[in-house]
Amino acid sequence: MYGLTRYKLFFLLPGLIVLLAIILFPLLFTIRVSFSGWDAMSPGLGWIGASNYGRLLADGRFWQSLGRLGMIASTAVALEYALGFALALLVWRQIRFRRLVRVLFLVPMMTTPVVMAVIWRTIFHESLGPVNDVVALFGIPPVLWLTSPEWATFVVILVDVWQWTPFMFLLLLAGLLSLPREPLLAAAIDGAGPIRAFVNVTFPAMAPISVGAILIRLIEASKIMETVYVITSGGPGTSTETSSYYIFIRGLRDFQIGYAAALSMTYLVIMIVLLTIIAKLLAKTLVKAES
């Protein structure tokens, strides 16, 4: 039996080596580059120690972009979870054309992010877009959707919610369909209404799936880049500039490769720590509430 196990592992070895190479080499190379002064003037891996990390600690623009990312990501994911859960509950019930509705909800998620962002930028264009025309019908003056910091942030969040709510809907609907019927039937026999059954039965039973769905979306939302790049380019000013976009500016626009690598490694560590803490808090509040 032991020989058979070793025989199976032997066939898994090539794939494992490739996987480790794909993961480890870029990570180790980025760490090495972060200790170099590689830029447009002096390309190469010349060792400069922790200078890039010292510069990073004093870089207020990076820390502001990190806080801005936290606000955008948390707001978007919260809205996506609420809307996704509501849509999942709606489709979970016996409604007409349920299969068609499921497919329609998935269309935004299947759209190419850059193409989708270009369309939304056109929609919210302040002179050519249709949104201000609709607003004008109610006697409201034109809104500076993309040149006002508050409204530009709103548009970025709106586009992210529109694109990724179907993903949350899909995960939560799968969780609802996997729930046992007995607790719901028992609640109905006890005279519990829809709201009471949801609060006391459905929502607690969905806690583990909710934690997983929220974490997956937080990981993806923390990398938001295409939407910001196409719709606002981080503007007006730096009001919608996220960490990923700032690293892009430093690395591929200013060609400060060494500094961008240091930013990337710091960003990675911060995200790992924060997401671990968030996962523990969600598990403590949601999953333990179920038990």
Image (cartoon, rainbow, N blue to C red):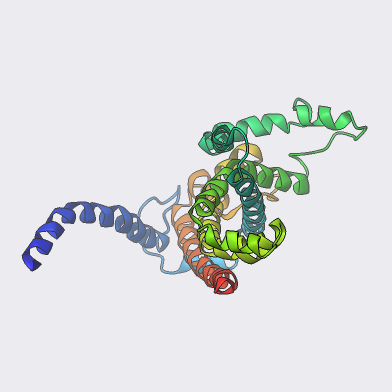
* Figure check: 289 above or below 61: below
> Count the marks: how many?
0
Q: Which of 111 and 150 is in front in this view?
A: 111
* Figure check: 239 above or below 66: above
Q: Which residue is found at the position 53% from the left and 34% from the top?
A: 111
Q: In which quarter of the image is residue 87?
A: top right
Which residue sits furthest front? 189
Which residue sits furthest left? 3
Left or right, 99 with reference to 189 = left
Q: Which residue is found at the position 53% from the left and 61% from the top?
A: 182
Q: Nearer the viewer, residue 195 or 113?
A: 195
Q: Is residue 216 in sight in this rendering?
A: yes
Which residue sits furthest right? 139
Residue 229 in percent (x, y) is at 59, 41
Residue 56 in percent (x, y) is at 54, 64
Residue 243 in percent (x, y) is at 57, 55
Left or right, 8 with reference to 248 = left
Q: Which of 41 and 182 is in front in this view?
A: 182
Q: Which of 72 and 65 is in front in this view?
A: 72
Which residue sits furthest top? 128
Residue 145 in percent (x, y) is at 77, 39
- In which quadrant of the rendered image does the N terminus lie? bottom left
Left or right, 41 with reference to 138 = left
Q: Is residue 59 in sight in this rendering?
A: no
- In which quadrant of the rendered image does the C terminus lie? bottom right
